[in-house]
Amino acid sequence: MLIVSTGANKGIGSEVAHQLAASGCKVLVGARNKARGDEAAAKLKSEGGEVGHLEIDLGDSATIASAAQSINTDFGHLSTFYSAMPASSGWRTACFRVAVLMQSSGLPRKLLEQRGSDMGP
């Protein structure tokens, strides 16, 4: 199972990534900052997880498209996308943008959200 967890270099996103990796999932640590994302991924790897870093900024369509293409090229699938983006940051719009770009890249769409609301079409 391949899961992207955004904001995974700190806070709740980090804990989600940690729990998923500990349960045996392959996790891509989604982070805007490459150095912080690489550092978070390395820490989880050192704990025995199958982890990589995915540079993605949910406020930037270009990085979302690039991330979708990378996932499609490197893995060919994505099981789940988890966003730890706070509600005040426009997470619903950002997650919908991710879903559209992931789907247009041929990836299946299944999103887990911090608040568990339905994403809609």
Image: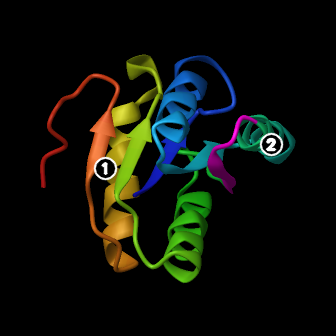
Q: Based on the picture, tell me whether residue 84 belongs to the magenta stretch.
A: no
Q: Foreground residue, 106 or 101?
A: 106
Point out the stretch of residues depicted in magenta: 47-54
Disc 2/disc 1 C-alpha distance (Å): 29 Å
Q: Tell me the element at label 1.
A: helix
Residue shown at the point (31%, 33%) measured from the top left: 113
* Quadrant (top left, top right, bottom left, bottom right) of the N terminus: bottom left
Residue 73 x, y percent position in the rendering: 56, 82
Instruction: Report which quarter residue 23 is drawn in.
Output: top left
- The residue that disc 2 covers is 42
Q: Secondary structure at mark 2?
A: helix
Mark 1 residue crowding within 10 angstroms, few (<14) / some (14–19) / many (20+): some
Magenta segment, principal secondary structure? Answer: strand
Furthest residue in direction right, as rendered: 35
**Compared to 97, does 16 lie above or below?**
above
- Residue 96: which numbered mark, if any? 1
Residue at 28% across, 68% down: 108
Q: Mark 2: give few (<14), some (14-19) or many (20+) Cα within 10 Å.
A: some
At x 36%, y 45%, the residue is: 95
Determine if the magenta segment contains residue 49.
yes
Along the viewing direction, whichever of 101 and 16 lies nearer the viewer: 16
Kind of residue at disc 1: Phe
Q: How many numbered discs?
A: 2
Task: Say which label, 2 or 1, has the lower sequence index.
Answer: 2
Place of residue 44 in the rendered image (x, y in percent of width and height, measured from the top left): 70, 37
Task: Give how far across and how far down residue 10 sits, in percent.
Answer: 67, 23
